[in-house]
Image (cartoon, rainbow, N blue to C red):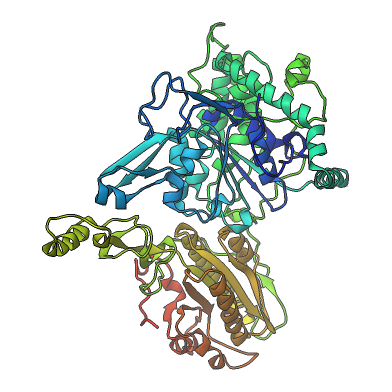
Amino acid sequence: MADSLTTADPLYPFSAVVGVSDLRTALLLNAVSPAIGGVLARGEKGTAKSTIVRALATLLPAVDVVAGCRFACAPAGADPDCPDGPHDAGAPAQHRPARLVELPVGATEDRLVGALDLHRILAEGVKAYEPGLLAGAHRGVLYVDEVNLLPDHLVDLLLDAAAMGRAYVERDNVSVRHAARFLLVGTMNPEEGELRPQLLDRFGLAVSVSAPRDPNERAEVIRRRLAFEADPAAFTAAWHEADRDLAAQIVAARRRLPHVVLPDAELTRIATVCAAFGVDGMRADIVVARAAVALAAWRGLDAVTEDEVRDAARLALPHRRRRDPFDAPGLDDEQLDRALDDARQQAREQPDKTPPDETPPDQTPPGQDLPNEKPPNEKPPDEKPPDETRGGPPPDPTPPDDGGGPSGGGADRPQETGSTGQGSGQTSVAASDPTYRARLLAVPDARTTGHSGRRSPAYTRDGRTTAARQPDGPLTRLHLAATLTAAATASLARPSFRVTAEDLREAVHKGREANLVLFVVDASGSMAARHRMRAVKGAVLSLLRDAYQRRDKVALITFRGADAELVVPPTGSHHVGAARMRDLVTGGRTPLALGLALAVRVLGIERLRDPRRRPLVVLVTDGRTTSGPDPAQVTPALRGVATVVVDCESGPVRLGLAARLAGLLDGQHLRLEDVSADALRGVALERRAA
């Protein structure tokens, strides 16, 4: 049974959470078999993602650990590499609840994996290591809220540890490693940005969570929440038996897991389904197989059936079928049915030859929970008749709302409905030209440390070493040569050579940073003339794709008629910007100055929110202005901001207004046809520093 976590405030009971059946199932499957690889919950804010994850830890079986071991080593079979070891076979044991460790968004690499105390290592010769959050989560749950806001290198470290079951700390020829096996759960709001497909693929299961649309279900959510807030102890006690039954079912499913058979026919069905969806690599096939076996164990079955394969595919494939960075994850149920029909036909043609006593390959010992919502005092699922046990939690009837727009396919794009002349009040929606690889646009070298990324040169935590300096805080990046040089110089006045704290030097790295790319797009009637907007949309979408690949934040301002509009506030959700750009309405007069003024206000607000992220303004216009004030009145406010003016003027007679505007902004002038990397490869923005 699971002991309750020791906490000052009672946790909301797992069984009392309304809806989110897919998320509940995914969590419980990973509780039964951690080898599945964790859960990613995608959804809008206020959908109980954090509540149910925190409640999960109360269901996990308690663990026996070596007393005093900071790395939660088991008394039987302690980790031979444990930094607190070696542990004696008869070392005293401690029985404690499984832990839930939360990784905050602002965590550093040292906080995650642990840190070596370089001061003690160099000055005292002691191998001192301070464990990180991965050590604390060993044999428990590691919960990462807003995982999409974590720096990519931290997500890589996190997923590598989850996949290998070990954490590594490497610092200047000093290495520490320890066991780190945990149930990884990440939550994210897609509106705040997407994870890279490579990182999405590392999560075993992914679930889209949305608020219920049924008024009765929403009312029940409110009713239970108010009852919990009024008397947490009484509410928790009312659901205690339901949670206890779920904990018992987790234990029973873990014991049953190694004996569940995966027949050859179902293995072929899994391969057929994954091939039908065209997923990359073999991770999807393996995850579906592991999840199907865990589902069978959860349902009390001796062998996997087609029902388990279908339910496992629904959880393991949606986030692996994206073919374009701007596609929102999802699964086509009709395509899944067709794939299952094909596999069924193959099974009839090739009867299953699995021996009756065959057992599946070794499974990693199960390690977390799978809850089913049920009222208090209901009997454990293991006591249900076989027909009821097979069902499992029903799928969430509400379709996922990922906040995204159409995918990158041409069939989803709006068709061109006409063009409008300059000054006309008519509007139109133009299709876009195909996207292409955009040239690199960058801001000048930074003098301060920026956000790690792939766009502009800057001082970062990674990259090539360019200098050394005395640390102004904890030393994490030792510059060994500079440290020894400083110690040797200081030792001239000492009786012997030794390294002191004053001699330590840290390395200064120069790499690349991620920026805020603010697109300011002219959507007036002059831009719609001669189908010019098709090429403009293709260029902006190509630059948006480039910003996605370089891990930038993006924002989109459009101006036409009598006003300018912030269509997409600064965000990491690039597919939202792509959807808005494809649906962009054009027509009307050209208030160029209003678009620039709105850009100044957006940059000012964002500078207060995120002062380390430098902006890059991409102004897409032909330079004409037919309404509002003179742009020359606004351009001084943008001086000092890296700016690229993409000149959309076309035709045999060109006025050169966009080039003149680039001069006023002290920015780079770039013709529309030169946005492609094929026209000019890898040319960075050349402008003088402010």
Q: Residue furthest top?
A: 356
Q: Quadrant of the C terminus?
A: bottom left
Residue 378 spot, x, y in % from top left? 82, 24
Q: Is residue 22 left or right of residue 479?
A: right
Q: Quadrant of the N terminus?
A: top right
Is residue 492 placed above or below 160 in the rendered structure?
Answer: below
Is residue 486 placed above or below 233 in the rendered structure?
Answer: below
Q: Is residue 69 left or right of residue 264?
A: left
Residue 345 spot, x, y in % from top left? 62, 20
* Number of numbered discs visible in the structure rendering: 0
Q: Residue furthest front?
A: 495
Residue 628 spot, x, y in % from top left? 65, 90
Is residue 587 placed above or below 15 in the rendered structure?
Answer: below
- In the picture, residue 207 is in which quadrant? top right
Of 234 and 666, the residue lying toward us = 234
Of 536 and 564, the residue lying toward us = 564
Is residue 158 placed above or below 542 in the rendered structure?
Answer: above
- In the picture, residue 437 is in which quadrant? bottom left
Residue 382 spot, x, y in % from top left? 73, 17
Of 443 and 534, the residue lying toward us = 443
- Looking at the image, can residue 419 be seen? no
Q: Is residue 484 left or right of residue 203?
A: left
- In the picture, residue 299 is in which quadrant? top right
| Rendered residue at 68%/16% (across/down) | 300
| Rendered residue at 60%/74% (across/down) | 557
Of 92 and 315, the residue lying toward us = 92
- Looking at the image, can residue 473 be seen? yes
